[in-house]
Amino acid sequence: MVALAAATWALLGGQAYALGSSSTYTWQQIYAMGHLNAHNGRLLPGCHMYPWSYSIHPPEGVNWEVDVYIDGPNNTHLATAGLLKGADGLNGVRYYRLCSAIAPKGTYTIVSVMNLWDSSGVDHAAHLPVVHYTLS
C-alpha cells in the first residue's frame, strides 16, 4: 500500500490540491476519503453476482465520482463500475457478474480512483486503497 501511495504521489506530481477557496488537500487526504471492500469466498460454478461495498467521505460541497476497476487473477480485467454524487449514496453495496468459465480461482483486485471537482471545476484525482480478495 505504501508503494501504491508513493506511486500515486509521483503520478500526481507531488502536489497539494486546492478544493474550493479555503481548503488544500494532499494526495494522502484524498486517499483517505474512501475505501472499498470485498470478502474472500467461493467461486461458484456458472455465472453469479458477487458483492463489493464502498464508503466515501468527500468534503462538503465538492462534486465527486469514483471509477472502479475489478481485475481477476493474471490482471484480467473483469468489470468496471462508477459511483457518482447525486446518483449514489456515500455508503453502499454493488454487485458484478462473474462467470466461472472465464474467471479462474485466485486473487482478485479492486482498484479505484476518486475524482473531485472544486468550485472552479478543476478535476483532482487520487487512488483509493487497493482491495485484494480471494475466490477459491
Image: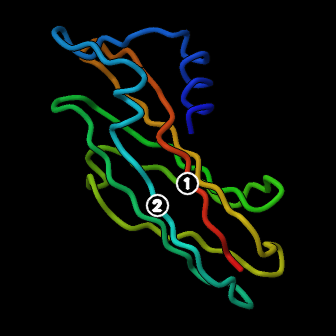
| SS label for mark 1 | strand
Residue 71 screen position, x and y as percent: 70, 56
Instruction: Point out the image quarter for the C terminus.
Output: bottom right
Front-lying residue, 120 or 58: 58
> Residue 83's mark?
none
Tell me the amino acid under the disc marked 1. Answer: Val
Quarter of image, res 46: bottom right
Residue 14 screen position, x and y as percent: 51, 10
Q: Earlier in the sequence, mark 2 or mark 1?
A: 2
- Tell me if 89 is positioned left or right of 37 in this view: left
- Tell me if 73 is positioned left or right of 68 in this view: right
Specify the farthest residue to the bottom.
Answer: 45
| 38 shown above or below 66 | below
| 44 shown above or below 8 | below
Contact? badges 2 and 1 (CB < 8 Å): yes
Q: What residue did someone put label 1 on?
A: 131
Front-lying residue, 62 or 26: 26
| SS label for mark 2 | strand
Residue at 36% across, 44% down: 34
> Residue 37's mark?
2
Q: How far apart are the alpha carbons under marks 2 and 1?
A: 6 Å
| 93 shown above or below 89 | below
| 127 shown above or below 56 | above
